[in-house]
Amino acid sequence: MSAVWQVSRAAVKRRKVQTFVIGLVVLTSTVALVVALGLLDAASTPFDRTFDQQYGAHLVVTFDPAKATGAQLAEAAHRPGVTAVSGPFAQVVLTAPPTRTNPPPGVDYPAPGPITVVGRADPGGPVDRVDLWDGRWVSGPGEVVLMRPPGQEFGVNERVGSRILLPDAPPLTIVGFASSLSQSAGAWVTPGQMAALHPTATQLLLRFAHADTDGQVAAGLAAVTAGLPPGASLGSLSYLAVKQDMTGTARAYVPFLLGFGVLGLVVAVLIVANVVSGAVVSGFRHIGVLKALGFTPNQVVSVYLVMVLAPGVAGAVLGTGLGHLAAQPLLRMVFQGFHAGYFSATLSPWVEVLTLLGMPATVLLAALVPALRAHRLSAARAISAGSAPRAGRGLRVQRRLSGTRLPRAVSLGLGLPFARPGRTALTLASLALGVTTVTLATGLASSVNALMLTSKEDVQTVVYVGDASVAGQVQPKLTDQQIDSTLRALPGAARVAAAAPVQLHVVGADQGAWVWFLRGDSATVGGALLKGRWLNGPGEVVAPTPFLRKYGLSVGSRLTLELNGRQQAVTVVGENLDGNADSMDAGWGALTALTSEQAAHRYVNQYWVGLAPGADVGAYDNAVKAAEPGLEPAARGGTNSITVSIVGSTSVLTLLLSTVAALGVFNTVVLNARERRRDLGMLKSIGMTPRQVRVMMVTSMAALGLAGGVLGVPVGIAVHHVIIPAMTDAAGFGLPPGVMAVWHLPLLALLVLAGIAIAVLGALVPAHSAARLTIAEVLRNE
Amino acid sequence: MVVRLDGVRKEYGDTAALDGVSLEIRAGEAVAVMGPSGCGKSTLLNMVAGLDRPTAGSVTVDGEDLGRLNETGLALFRRRRIGMVFQFFNLIDDLSALDNVALAAQLTGSSAAQARKRALELLDELGVADRRNAYPSVLSGGERQRVSVARALMNRPALLLADEPTGALDSRSGEQVMDLLIDLNQIGQTLLIVTHDQHLATRCASRLVQVADGRIAGESVIAEPAAARPSGVGRSGVGRTT
């Protein structure tokens, strides 16, 4: 064992508290960074990698074959900026009806709603090289390949060899499953089979030279459609919208996790710098002895670096491991659902390598500056001084404070921070960052709650219509209109809106969209409006930001809805707050226009009820059940899994970072008390009571806590103002104004007090130890 | 010649702590530097130990011109040629007595096992082997100083420097340390002791150097060098293996 290692190891053992503090703070920030970087990587890399492998289409454009001829499309596909093209492929949208029975063996019913079928001879080509992950490609009539994310089969009998019953089509045998990240189709058949299905559109799959931004993709679309007859383009789908749709939830977590990771990193740097500079200052004699014994200056520096590197490495290793474990469920949660097959809930190795190497390197750099002081220190001076000389400023402040009317223990305590300005500054900074963390966490939790409340509409209970095909449920005897009247008549009801969710085809989009057709008091249940206005007539829809982004729409845009061959042109009149990229709201009139008044009633499967102020939700739900056993009322819960996970992880990280800030204070008080043993002994010898010693030491840190609170709260608010918009932007929806307005005076005062609380908590134990120090013990050690 | 100081001057700001000091110490000599507080005797010791650099003049120890060494060179010089004993012991609180002593040998590249073996022998010779696992904070002053001396002897230094070695000890412990130094000198160890304790100086040293206001104010020979006296195991026990 080398001498440097021997002395470093002894120093680590001796400074258990500091070692623990460094280990904990490095662990905390490593966990946050591993999870944040893991999510960041998982949200981009798998999509980009698969997209590149498949030569994914930057844009899927559908054309009306009646308006754009094959020759025109061929010419359009070679406009400047287009680097590759596949197609044109014939396309048709088939709408599967809802079914309430299980399919017979060997037969599969498609999920209700529209399915885009494309005629394609092979899965390859210059663009959208479809990943055929099971079975084979279609080779003749009567065959179909279904689009499914890798490894996912949805239907009861959905497997290679089964037959699928698509509407308006002969039974087709499933010969394979394939995935297309371009989402160019829901199913593929041979071009010959497609002719028999009577195609209604033509599809072009395009790649552009520049397609990094929405603007570049839109410019590509404009170049392709320029010169075509009006209305020739039925719609388009940008890969950026698909990417946003698939990764938006994951990206929403990244800003706040990165924020906490960076805060943790800064706190780690401060704590390490504080610990090492404290060790150097209080260990002047120790440094002198080492040099007198023959340690070279570099060896002395090495002692201090190894001293912090040991817990730093331990924290980084443990933090990476814990981060790895913490990231798995989070990744699974944010990538659950239809797109899960494209992503894997595993971290990329670079994330772990980065934290395993980067965190110890950061610790080393943080320790290097104060450790270099030991390098420069003259051995003779160090060995004679015993500890670093104190600045005169502290003494002057002490003299001024002694003239005040404050109790002497308090005035002495207030003067202590001025004796070591460097240490005080580092402690103050970590306290301020502790308060910043608490402030940020409070703001995040409040904003996320506000966001959820805003988006959740003013609905206290949702009454679902029973479905006899589901075990335990009863079909209502009352009709839709009778249920509506009954719910309105029950005591406590203030607003009732009937909702008919229908999956239908948006002309120009390959995937179906859920449209919630609303009737009654729908204005108060549609969620917060970000732009535009609420529904006013049958030809209108209100859509959430992700939906509009996905299809390149905005308020004022027109689109065509199609259900069972009937079309209805609608205008987007409002943009509302919802993270769903596949749903929008429409008025009752739009549904009756697409079906019939009678058929429309059959689609209603739930009623959203707003209660009068003071009305009891439980009592209302009981009354509903009593009035019609076929109804299933469900009171609206206050939280969802995203809220819980954001608030939960925020709370854990805040608790850890606040604890670390308190431990930073602990470290400072330990150093101060150790350095001032002689002063403490002297003060006690002239009559200072243990309680006064405690008051003095705690006061010194409480003052710093107050200053830290005053500094940390505005920083926390500023970080909150950066992170929340970044989160909502990453999630793909706009920012309602009320979400940021979570700060009020009493809360701010409490947050400032949090600084004092952290400081006092950190100071209590070492202050107690200082108070218990016996004079004889001090003198013996002197 | 083990030590040669030639016209050494050391200034701290406007104050000259040493002013033209020249001094020679032969191998096997035991020299005591005496003088009142602040006269410059500790500065002189720091110069010889390579802990500080003179403003002017030269310091040569065991043939090494310290002015030509950089900080690393000085550190290597100290670990191989110098042993130091301090008034307040300056043991490393984090290490046991045994590890404090072994540390000096480990610096020169000895393995931990070798270093501990020799450290244990020295502690045994100095009568504190039974305290080898104790930490400095629980040792008595005399025990701490014995451990400190053992550490200083670990690398068989050409020169043992002692700065007020009995200054923090009670009279009985002080006498024990004096016996130790005498015994070491008797077996050939060159000593430079800085003290203002007349009794220590006359008991342990063969030559007295008086320092006043940073200058050599006088020298006197007390006895012939210890190396010339009959050798053997002294009252402290030193000499059995050292």
Image (cartoon, coloured by chain):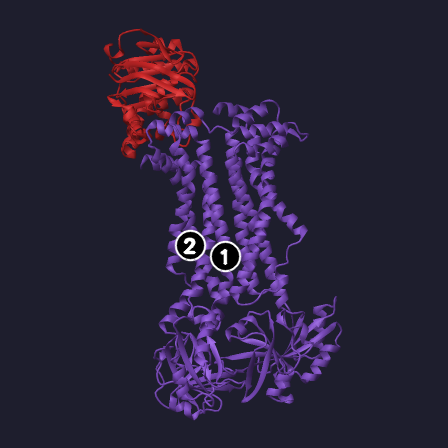
Chain colours: A purple, B red
Q: Name the disc covering residue A324, or none.
A: none
Q: In whole angstroms, how far apart are the C-alphas of marks 1 and 2?
A: 17 Å
Place of residue A499 in the rendered image (x, y in percent of width and height, measured from the top left): 63, 78
Q: Residues within 10 Å of mark 1 (few under 14, many from 20)?
A: many
Q: Quadrant of residue B197?
A: top left
Q: Residues within 10 Å of mark 2 (few under 14, many from 20)?
A: some
Identified at 45% across, 73% down, the residue is A217
Q: Residue furthest front?
A: A227
Identified at 68% across, 72% down, the residue is A524
Mark 1 residue type: Leu
- Front residue of A552 and A581: A552
Identified at 53% across, 61% down, the residue is A726
Can the viewer see residue A138? yes
Secondary structure category for the residue under label 2: helix
Q: Quadrant of the N terminus of chain A?
A: top left
- Front residue of A772 and A715: A715
> Mark 2 or mark 1, which is nearer the start of the sequence?
1
- Front residue of A568 and A165: A568
Mark 2 residue type: Gly
Q: Is residue A533 placed above or below A13 in the rendered structure?
A: below
Secondary structure category for the residue under label 1: helix
Place of residue A459 in the rendered image (x, y in percent of width and height, measured from the top left): 67, 70
Of discs 1 and 2, which sits in the foreground?
A: 1
Place of residue A401 in the rendered image (x, y in percent of width and height, measured from the top left): 63, 30
| Label 1 in the same subunit as label 2 | yes
Residue, disc 2: A321
Place of residue B152 in the rendered image (x, y in percent of width and height, measured from the top left): 32, 23
Residue, disc 1: A257
Name the chain letter of the residue that bears numbered label 1.
A
Q: Quadrant of residue A682?
A: top right
Can the viewer see residue B182? no
Name the chain letter of the residue that bears numbered label 2.
A
